[in-house]
Amino acid sequence: MEKNPPPPSSASLSYTPYPQPPPQPQTLSQSNVIITRFGSQSQHLTCPHCHANISTRVETESNMKTHLMAVFLCALGLWCCVPCPYCMDDCLAKKHYCPSCDIYLGIGEN
């Protein structure tokens, strides 16, 4: 007959619990997020970064639509018309910036 080893005594196993810190109240930061649809014109709003009342500064930039129009004109053989999409407002993206803190606010595309 085989003997099972005796279970370990409670004296040989010492368990020292670590002190638990008291639970901290969870605070959620309240941030007002304002979603604005930007168009091609300057928008009057309050900057979410510097909280100033501003009219946005609009900068135009070429985007995928601009490049696709240029490639399409190349495919048609209209080489002299390739620069036209880069000069047309309808083919350019309008990026809006805060004039006070120069932070990017959003984009308006046609």
Image (cartoon, helix red, strand yellow):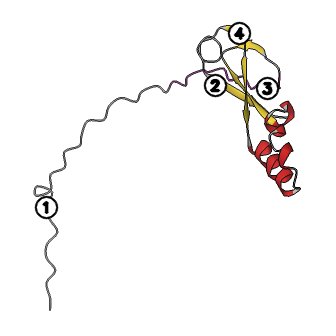
Which label was assigned to residue 54? 4
Instruction: Classify mark 3: helix, strand or loop.
Output: loop
Crowd rating for badge 2 (residues with CA inside 10 Å; few <14, some 14–19, many 20+): some
Residue 20 placed where, x, y %?
A: 30, 35
Residue at screen point 61% across, 10% down: 100
Between circles 3 and 1, the one closer to the viewer is 3
Q: Which label number is shown at residue 104?
A: 2
| Disc 1 target residue | 9
Alpha carbon separation for disc pair 3 and 1: 73 Å
Quote the CA–CA distance across marks 3 and 2.
12 Å
Kind of residue at badge 2:
Tyr
* Contact flag, marks 2 and 4 (Cβ < 8 Å): no
Q: In this rendered view, identify the residue nearer to me: 89 or 39.
A: 89
Residue farthest toward the top in the current orientation of the protein: 53
* Amino acid, disc 3: Phe
Please indicate whether residue 101 sits to the left or right of residue 8 in the image. Answer: right
* Quarter of the C terminus within the rendering: top right
Which region of the structure is painted magenta? 27-40
